[in-house]
Each structure stands twice: as structure tokens, then as C-alpha cells.
Amino acid sequence: MDHIRAELGHSRVYAVGPLGLSRAENSSTGSEVLSWLDAFEEEGSVLYVCFGSQKLLKKKQMEALALGLERSETRFVWVAPTPSKEQMEEGYGLVPDGFLDRVSGRGMVVTGWAPQVAILNHRVVGGFVSHCGWNSVSEAMVSGVVIVGWPMEADQFLNARLLVEERGVAVRVCEGADSVPDSNELSRVVKRVMSGESPEKRRAKLMRDEGVRAVSEGGDSSMEVDRLVEALVQLGDNQG
């Protein structure tokens, strides 16, 4: 923040957020996946798996991820968009045959759109296998869930480093758009971070608490919003 203010040459820079907390309170209800989650009792026991709305995995990546989830013995919701015929010819993959039968009762695969904010804020969801895109990172942090990171491109590598090395709320299991995770390592990591209260899980919950305090009355973000409004009012008065 100090660097941005120095670059701009003025102090009119405001740290507002996390805005996702307001969206979390108004999450959608009634979807099939949320009803499926409602059937479980153990808080924080379900893993959410999603790589954004535009990212598809290659066939070998799908197979490795499926095998890792199967071996982890962890409940999960996996958002796996169905590739087109042309995309399949280019090497993109489907959920492996027989996978759903083998994980029946503890795993759900969603092939279309999923209400991500509502899923992450569900009481039984405690972890998120993610590409570490910033929207997903923000939504995970305000939900208090640990991230199992697989950064693939652009800012995702820096985001993963911030989460893993500086904040301790994530574990990196793979890296790169074309990399294939080790199924055994993936299952081991998932089982560790999702079992009980892992250190990463505890820190993720603390991050959510910090976010709640920031946007509450008297919190840093709340006061920054007041300063922003005052600055806008002064700007309007000067122009008037």
C-alpha cells in the first residue's frame, strides 16, 4: 500500500474488503450439490475441487486427479466441465470410467456450473483444490477453508507462494498447466490437511476471522470505506 501511494504521489489509496463476506451471507440455496452437502454432519470434512470456469484438464491430469481423490478416502465435490468433441481430440479428458461407481456415497461430480461461494461457505466444506486464481483465493479465505494449490498460469504462481509460504493457509501439490500430479502424493496431502484440525485449516479459519473483523464496524476495512466516502464527498464539493 505504501508503494502504491508513493507511485501515485498521494494518499488516496484505500484498502477495502474482503467484499466476499457480504456475498457469502446471501449465497444461493436449493441446488442439487448443496442438498447433497446437507446430508453430511461432520463440519469441514468435504473437499471442493474446481479450477475455474475456463480451465479444462488433459486426460492424464483427469486420471491422476481422480485416482488421488479416490485414494484419499475423503468426501468431495469435483466440478469437472465436459469438454467438447474438438477439445477431446486435442487431448482434454473426461472423468474416468467407473470412477463415480467407486466413490459412490462420498463423492459428487458436477459437469456444469456450480454455486462456488455457497459451496465454500457450507459448514461441511473444509478444503479447496484450486488453481489459485485470485477470485477463488479471495472466496476461499473469507470462507475459512484450506487450499490445496495447483497453480497453472499468470498470477497463480505468486498467489500460491503467498498462501503457502507467507500465510500458511495452503499446501502446493502440483505446478504448471501441463503438469500431472502424483496421485499418491495428492491423496496423502488431501488426507492430512482434511483430517481433523490441521495447522493449515486452523490458520485458514483465523484468516476468515480477520476478514470478519476488518469489515465489521470499527474494523480496518470499515474505516477505510468511511475515508473513501469522505474523499468522494470532498471531490464532489470541490467540483461543485
Image (spheres, rainbow, N blue to C red):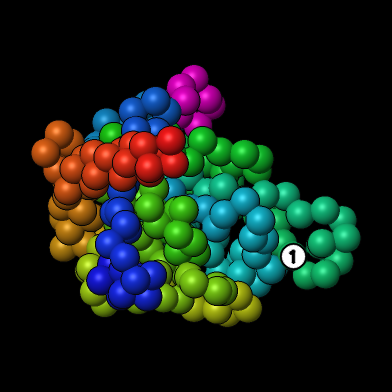
Q: Closest to the observer: 170 or 14?
A: 14
213 displayed left or right of 58: left
Q: Residue at x 72, y 62 (%)?
A: 93
Q: Residue at x 17, y 48 (%)?
A: 220
Rendered view: 93 above or below 21: below
Q: Closest to the observer: 236 or 193?
A: 236
Q: Residue at x 38, y 63 (%)?
A: 148
**Residue 125, can we see it?**
no
Q: Closest to the observer: 227 or 94?
A: 227
Element on which disc 1 rests: loop
Which stretch appears magenta? 28-34
Question: What is the residue that sits farthest to the left in this orientation?
Answer: 218
Q: Which residue is mark 1?
A: 92
The amino acid on which the numbered mark 1 sits, given as a three-letter code, is: Tyr
Rendered view: 200 above or below 14: below
Count of picture labels:
1
